[in-house]
Amino acid sequence: MWISRISGLGAQAVKRLTQGKFVCMPKAPYLNVSSSRVQTLLQLPPQVHRYLCNTATDSCNDKNEVEQTISVTFVETDGTQKHAKVPVGTSMLEAALSNDIELEGACEGSCACSTCHLIVMDVDYYNKLLDPTDEENDMLDLAFGLTETSRLGCQIEAKPEIDGIRLALPGAT
């Protein structure tokens, strides 16, 4: 499982870099490499290096504003609730993986599987989300324990309107 987390972090870093956004990589025991090593691994040009930092040791100098976060509660299959602060713009799949929530995300957030299936526990929050795309609906049809408020975690983006959302993990994937 830790391998999918590392590859997910790498895929998201590349995605954000290609979108012109900088990436602050969290310090994690399974990803203990310097930003210059990440630059080498990703084969990035030197000018992109300044966008990679480790939040435990560096501060992103290009980041003038405080990163806005929202509160998300994940309800696991045994009823255990885990509260997380999630940066705005982060998918719920990324948020779950970075907070040790057992959500698989086999396709690494490309909307090609249903292993990041989540259930929005409050209809009001569900209605605040963007409507699911046809691709997401096709994948949801394959999900175990589908409900009226089911969504894929890779398709739910953290935004201020959903601050306080509660997401339940289905009984199986």
Image (cartoon, helix red, strand yellow):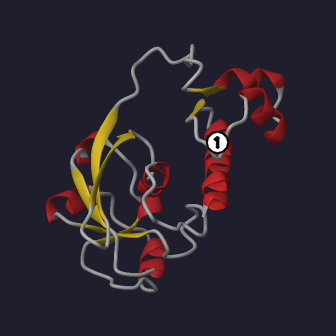
11 lies left or right of 144: right
Q: Residue at x 24, y 68 (%)?
A: 79
The crowding category of the residue bearing disc 1, from other C-alpha atoms within 10 Å (few below 14, some 14 to 19, many at least 20), is many
Query: Where is the N terminus found, in terms of image quarters?
Result: bottom right
Vertical position of residue 28 compared to residue 154: above or below? above
Instruction: Check disc 1 and give the amino acid type.
Output: Ala
Vertical position of residue 53 compared to residue 83: above or below? above
Q: Position of residue 106 (x, y in %)?
A: 59, 70
- Element marked by disc 1: helix
Q: Residue at x 59, y 18 (%)?
A: 58
Vertical position of residue 148 compared to residue 67: above or below? below
Q: Residue at x 20, y 57 (%)?
A: 125
Q: Quadrant of residue 132?
A: bottom left
139 lies left or right of 27: left
Q: Position of residue 133 (x, y in %)?
A: 43, 68
Vertical position of residue 76 compared to residue 50: above or below? below
Residue lying farthest to the front in this orientation: 29
| Residue at which label 1 appears | 13
Query: Where is the C terminus found, in terms of image quarters?
Result: bottom left
